[in-house]
Structure formats: C-alpha cells, structure tokens
Image: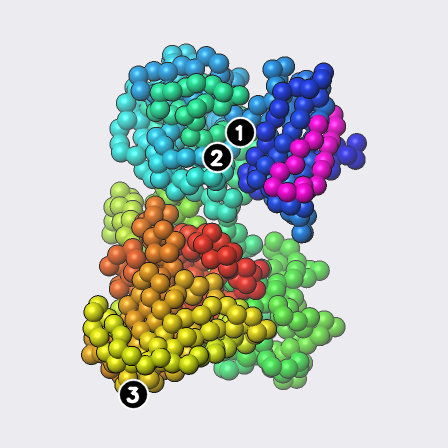
C-alpha cells in the first residue's frame, strides 16, 4: 500500500509539470508479457522508473535503472493489459524531469494518444484522433494535455455524435492551433462561424499544454482555458458552431490528408493528446484564482495597535489616533510577490520601513526599491478571525517584529517576545479597481484580463512602474485610473463600457518611457559580474575601417575578460580611433563591459570606438560601434551597451524578436518599454533588454517587470535558457 501511495504522489507531481523532455521506445514482446523499454533523450546519471498498472488502475510492478549514457533499456512485465507511467529524475538533485504515459494492449505498448483505427476524414479535415465517451449535458469540463511536435493547421473539437461525422463543421466547441497561436471562434449554432478567430496564446513546438473546455449544452456556449505550466489563458465565452443536445466525443484534427497509422501515431501527426478527462462534477470544475488578496480586497485600512490608530506621514509611525481622522491613518496593503506585503500610507504614499537596528523606530519612508526594507510577513495572531483581521508583522529578512513603546507611542522593531498585535480595520474606502470589479463590464472580462488589471494595479508592479515609484516618465496606474474613471462615471452605456475595456486591452502603445528606456539606480555588482576584470594586450597601430568603409588611424587591442577566479571568459578585439574623446570612451568601455554578465555579451567579438558627430551606437552580428564626439560616463556606456547587445543577442539567436513568440508578447502585454522601442520588434527587444538589466539588481523591479510585461519577460527567459547557456539562474536570488 505504501508503494502505491508514493507512486500516486509522484504521478501527481508529473501531471503538474507537464514536461515531456524524454521519449520512450518499446520493442516487440520478448517472451510472454515481458517487453523491453528504452528511454532516450536523457543524461548520464538520470534515474528512470517505469510503473505498470492494470485496467483497474491497480499497481502491478515497478522497474528502475540509472542511465550510463543518453539512453537506458530494461525489461518490464506488462501483465498484458493496462498502462505504464515512465518517470525521469535529474541526476544531480533528483528532481522530477519528465513523465511519459503509455497504453498497454495485446498488440504492444503505444503512446497514449487519442486515436482510432477508423479515422473519419471529411473534405480537407483528416481526423487524426477520435474518441467517444459517456454523454454529458448541462455544465461540463473536458481536459486533455496536448504536446505540439511541429507547426501545422490543427484543431481539437468536441461534439455530439448524433450530428454525424465530427469535424470543424459539426463541432460544438473548437480550439484551433494554426501554426503560431491557439485561437477560438464564435459559431452560429447551425454549422457556420459567426466571427473571425480570436487568438488566445502562443502555440510552441516541443511544449505541453493543459487544455480545458468549459461548456454548457443548455445554452450552447463554451470557453477554453490553456495553461502552459506557468500562465493560464482564458478565452471569452464562445458559441457552438453546431448546437448539440449533449457532448459525447472529441476529435483531434489535422488538415494534412495522410493518416497512415504507425505504432499508434500518424505519419502527419503534428501533436499528441494525452490524459483525457470528462466531468460534470462542480468540485472538479472549480478553478483556483491566480491572484488572491488573502482578505485585502483592494480597500484602505486603519491599523490599530493597543486600541489606537497608526498614522504614517510624519517620518515615523505613531499610534495615537482615537479614530481615522485623516488620510495619514489610511493604509493599503500591496502584494510584493514574494509572500510579503508593503503598507502604503494614503496621504504621503510613504511605506512602513524597517529601521537599521533593533529597538529603533519604524519609519514612514518613500519607496525603497533595492532591498527588502519595506517587505513584511503577515502572521495571523491567536485572535485572528474573518471579522478580526489581527496580525503580527515580521520583517522578511529577520525574526524581528513590529512592536511598540507604551510611553512614546512610536512603533519600533522588536523581538518576538515584544511583538505588537496589529488589527486591520477595513474602511470600505475602495480603490478604483475594486469599485470597477463590481460592474457588469468587469464581469465580461476574461480571467486573464482581470489578472492583468489586478496584478499591475494592486501589486508591486503598479508601485515600481507607477505613480509612487517616481522612476518612470509615464505612469501605468494613471492610465488605468483614467479608464476606471470612465467606467464608473455613469456617462457610458454597458456596451460603451465594454468597448472601452476592449480598446484598453487592444492598445499596446502604452509606454513606460518616452524616448529610450533609462538605466538608473542599477547596482554596480550584478550577479555574475562581481570581481570580473580585463587584461589588455599590446596594441597594433594602423588604419582601420571604423564605420562602413570609413578608414581612420587608430589602435587595435586584444581585450581579455576574466571572472573573479581568473578564468578566461572571452577575448574581444577593440579598435580605438586616435582621438582623445575615443580614448576616453574606450577606458569607460573597459569599465562598463565587465559589469554585464558574460552570457549576455558572449556573442560580442568586435568593438569600434571613434570620434563621430553622428553621436550614435550601433550593434548587430558580433559587432558594436561607439560613435560619439563627447565623453561618456560609465552608467551611460553600460546602459547603451546593454541595448546594443540586445541587438547582438537577438540576431545570434535566429532573430528572436521577429519570431512568433516575441510578436505575440508585444501584442499581449499592456505596455511597451518605450516610444523608441515601439518603432519595430528589434528595437522593442533591445529596449526590453535595457529594462531587464535596470530591474536585474532590484528585487521589486524584477517582480514588477515580470508582472507588467509578462509575455516579454517569459519570452526573454526562454531565450536566456535556450541561447545563453542557461543564464538567468541567478535570477532566483531576486524572485524566490
């Protein structure tokens, strides 16, 4: 029994991961029920386990082996009926890495794809997989895990077999994934579409998605929820293309016509569907929200200590009000994205800030971005209840709490024995977003749209890139305030309110910076750069091409960069114009380049620095050109180098910015890095690179950037892992 339970727990872990990094190949049966399993695409030292189950889900046996190469083979007893789960664990930390499900039949073991030997092609639609299930009526949920192997014109459709062959025209619910995107489409209930397809999220190869259809046969509507393991995308409500009395079948459709079956897969199969589940149970259909306030519903609160209200605009926090007299005693909690909250005073926009030492007074200070001085863990007190929001507030970096002095009435930093009980009294003075959340127009938004509004407006993103931070030239939360003001004004009909929301989400021209992104308040010791140094070889004087055929006298230097341990990272060839301005900028370049992580500069080979009235930087291929007629400082040099290295990395990774992933990100994120970046995808990518490094040394900025431009942030993260030797692992220091 213990063995079965532990295996079920492991299975649950893998279903959550939805990872399919490895593949399994089954040989023909050797003798009786014994068959050889070969797991490929793994690393030496990985542990592989195959668990066998019968048709009744009862555990049969478990075989395991440790790989001594890129694959491992061993014999397993299948018992000739049921299914197999194959698991792979990482060789170093034994964390789950991959999971593969296989079906056991009397003819062998096959991948758990949904397929049928009697394909039902219709017109240009080749039904690559088809399965019927017990009919469901009313509210239903159908779940399937889809792995895309190559791009193509594909779809998953649900329907009623009573309507005939299940294909596009007879579907009651349809999810299209035509090459780059998943999309949904409204139908008229009579076999035709009534609107154009609406993109839902990117569809990437070699990636597994959890696809959920939530529908209702009573009104012939449905919506689709797709989870890529990190982000959940929810469509608006769609209508059936063909109305149905029930849902009893699913088909996986590809528009290729060759449906030759080989070992349970089709020769033109662009994707695989696994883990089909159909339910009408309300508990099974419930979704946990992505963003939870934990009782703080976007309201302002009074904070009571020892029966008195705290006020926070006087440089320190005192508890000396008998009632909430003014805005200095009104606070709103902000989710900081790391399990902690910050507390913002309405009148001053200052935050509750930890002092330098124990027993010192708690400060009321402007937003601190480079440390955790304003991050507080909310621990429920013994007296906590839904009607009594009573907490102990502990600083995230220590075991010290907010406490108080009976005589001074000042809040101070104390040990756990002297912590104060802080009670949050809701003032029911609602934030604009909270007021809007109670309107019909808000109800019509998708889950993802609501998440975007909440996460930017009510969290660290709104503060760090909004009105309170003071670091931007354009304020995202003000843009939202303008929208919310229109929705709440009473001057617009519901239809007009819906249109305003639609325009808001379709307008991706909202920018964070006018001109180019700034590079400010950045640590000089970014992770991966501390202790790096350069060694300059003997220069070679000559005449060199400094820009598009312009020949100038100068010196060519070999510049080698070493890490803090003296390991050679790379060697650059730097050409320096024979000019005082160019020589100054060369010395500044040597200081700036070592403050950029190696993985981000790895593709840079040549740098050419000249005196030039063009006053421009240029980057591409493996080259960066510095063309200035004035002397630059280190901060400006590093900032602009990061932008130009963005171009270099973009081009050396298959022109990443022109791919579907980055284009999708631009279309989905609410904000653009800068007006300069809005000119084209390449500049957008380079400007985001600059913003990424602006955030990289700051915990709050790191989280804020991930929230305010989540699709760009995710795409940039994929590039770091795929094209920069896994760089970005240091990011855990700021995000975990």
Q: Residues within 10 Å of mark 3 (few under 14, many from 20)?
A: some
In the displayed structure, does residue 87 sit left or right of residue 624? right
Asked if residue 9 shows in the view, the reply is no
Left or right? Give the position of 624 relative to 568.
Answer: left
Q: Secondary structure at mark 2?
A: strand
Res 630 → quadrant: bottom left
Q: Tell me, what colour scheme is on the image?
A: rainbow
For the C terminus, which image quadrant? bottom right
Real-space CA distance between mark 2 and mark 3, rounded to the nearest whole angstrom: 59 Å
> Does residue 676 appear in this view?
yes
Local SS, label 3? helix
Please provide percent x and percent y for residue 43: 61, 45
State the separation of the CA atoms marked 2 and 1.
8 Å
Q: Position of residue 458 (x, y in %)?
A: 45, 59
Name the secondary structure under disc 1.
Answer: strand
As drawn, 94 above or below 403:
above
Q: Residue at x 58, y 76 (%)?
A: 354
Chain-order first, disc 1 or disc 3: 1
Instruction: Write down the region rendered in magenta.
Output: 58-75
Q: Earlier in the sequence, mark 2 or mark 3?
A: 2
Q: Nearer the viewer, residue 97 or 7?
A: 97
Disc 1 designates what residue? 274
Q: Does residue 73 show up magenta in the picture?
A: yes
Separation of disc 1 and disc 3 at Cα?
Answer: 66 Å
**Going 37% across and 47% down the picture, which residue do you hit?**
661
Left or right, 248 with reference to 577: right
| Residue found at x 62% / y 38% | 71
Classify residue 641 by image quadrant: bottom left
From the image, tell me which residue sits under label 2. Answer: 147
Image coordinates for residue 129, horizontal then vertical, percent: 46, 21
Give me the disc on residue 580: 3
Question: Mostly what secondary structure, the magenta segment?
Answer: strand
């Amino acid at each position: 029994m213990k063995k079965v339970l532990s295996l079920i727990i492991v299975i649950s872990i893998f279903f959550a991961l939805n990872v399919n990094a490895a593949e399994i190949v089954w040989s023909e049966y050797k003798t009786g029920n014994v068959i050889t399993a070969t797991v490929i695409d793994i690393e030496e030292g990985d542990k592989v386990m195959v668990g066998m189950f019968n048709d009744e889900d009862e555990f049969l046996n478990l075989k395991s082996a440790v790989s001594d190469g890129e694959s491992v083979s061993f014999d397993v007893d299948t018992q000739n009926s049921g299914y197999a789960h194959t698991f792979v664990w990482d060789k170093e930390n034994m964390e789950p890495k991959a999971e593969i499900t296989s079906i056991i039949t009397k003819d062998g073991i096959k991948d758990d794809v949904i397929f049928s030997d009697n394909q039902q092609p219709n017109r240009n639609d080749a039904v690559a997989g088809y399965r019927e299930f017990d009919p469901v009526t009313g509210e239903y949920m159908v779940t399937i895990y889809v792995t895309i192997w190559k791009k193509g014109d594909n779809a998953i459709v649900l329907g009623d077999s009573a309507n005939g062959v299940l294909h596009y025209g007879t579907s009651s619910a349809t999810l299209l994934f035509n090459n780059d995107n998943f999309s949904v489409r409204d139908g008229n209930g009579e076999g035709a579409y009534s609107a154009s397809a609406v993109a839902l999220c990117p569809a990437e190869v070699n990636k597994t998605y959890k696809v959920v259809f939530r529908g209702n046969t009573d009104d012939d509507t449905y919506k689709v929820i797709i989870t890529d393991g990190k982000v959940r995308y929810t469509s608006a409500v769609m209508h059936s293309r063909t109305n149905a009395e029930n849902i009893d079948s699913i088909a996986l459709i590809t528009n290729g016509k060759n449906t030759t079956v080989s070992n349970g897969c089709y020769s033109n199969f662009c994707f695989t569907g696994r883990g089909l589940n159909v339910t009408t149970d309300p508990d099974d259909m419930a979704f946990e929200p992505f963003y939870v306030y934990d009782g703080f519903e976007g309201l302002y609160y009074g904070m009571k200590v020892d029966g008195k209200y705290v006020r926070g605009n006087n440089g320190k926090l005192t508890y000396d009000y008998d009632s909430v007299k003014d805005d200095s005693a009104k606070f709103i909690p902000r989710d900081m994205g790391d399990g902690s909250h910050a507390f913002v005073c309405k009148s001053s926009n200052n935050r509750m800030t930890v002092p330098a030492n124990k027993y010192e007074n708690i400060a009321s200070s402007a937003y601190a971005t480079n440390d955790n001085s304003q991050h507080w863990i909310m621990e429920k007190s013994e007296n906590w209840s839904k009607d009594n929001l009573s907490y102990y507030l502990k600083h995230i970096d220590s075991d010290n709490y907010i406490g108080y002095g009976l005589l001074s009435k000042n809040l101070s930093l104390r040990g756990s024995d002297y912590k104060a009980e802080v009670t949050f009294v809701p003032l029911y003075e609602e934030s604009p977003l909270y007021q809007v959340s109670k309107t019909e127009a808000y109800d019509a938004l998708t889950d993802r749209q609501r998440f975007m509004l909440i996460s930017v407006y009510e969290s660290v993103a709104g503060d760090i890139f909004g009105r309170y931070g003071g670091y931007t030239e354009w304020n995202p939360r003000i843009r939202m305030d303008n929208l919310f003001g229109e929705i709440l004004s009473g001057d617009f009909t519901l239809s007009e309110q819906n249109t305003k929301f639609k325009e808001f989400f379709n307008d991706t021209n909202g920018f964070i910076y006018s001109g180019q992104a700034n590079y400010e308040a950045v640590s000089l010791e970014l992770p991966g750069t501390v202790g790096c140094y350069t060694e300059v070889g003997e220069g070679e004087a000559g005449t060199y091409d400094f820009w598009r055929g312009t020949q100038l006298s100068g010196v060519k230097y070999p510049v080698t960069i070493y890490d803090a341990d003296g390991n050679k990272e790379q060697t650059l060839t730097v050409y320096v114009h024979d000019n005082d301005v160019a020589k100054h900028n060369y010395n500044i370049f040597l200081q700036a380049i070592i403050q950029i992580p190696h993985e981000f500069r790895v593709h840079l080979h040549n740098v050419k620095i000249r005196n030039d009235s063009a006053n421009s930087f240029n980057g591409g291929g493996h080259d960066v050109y510095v063309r200035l007629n004035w002397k630059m400082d280190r901060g400006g040099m590093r900032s602009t180098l990061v932008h130009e290295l963005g171009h270099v990395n973009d081009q050396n990774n298959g022109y990443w910015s022109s791919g579907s992933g980055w284009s999708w990100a631009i279309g989905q994120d609410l904000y653009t890095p800068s007006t300069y970046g809005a000119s084209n995808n390449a500049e957008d990518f380079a400007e985001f690179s600059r913003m990424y490094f602006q955030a990289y040394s700051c915990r709050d900025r790191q989280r804020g950037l991930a929230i305010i431009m989540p699709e760009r942030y995710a795409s940039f993260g994929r590039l770091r892992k795929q094209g920069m030797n896994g760089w970005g692992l240091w990011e855990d220091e700021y995000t975990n």
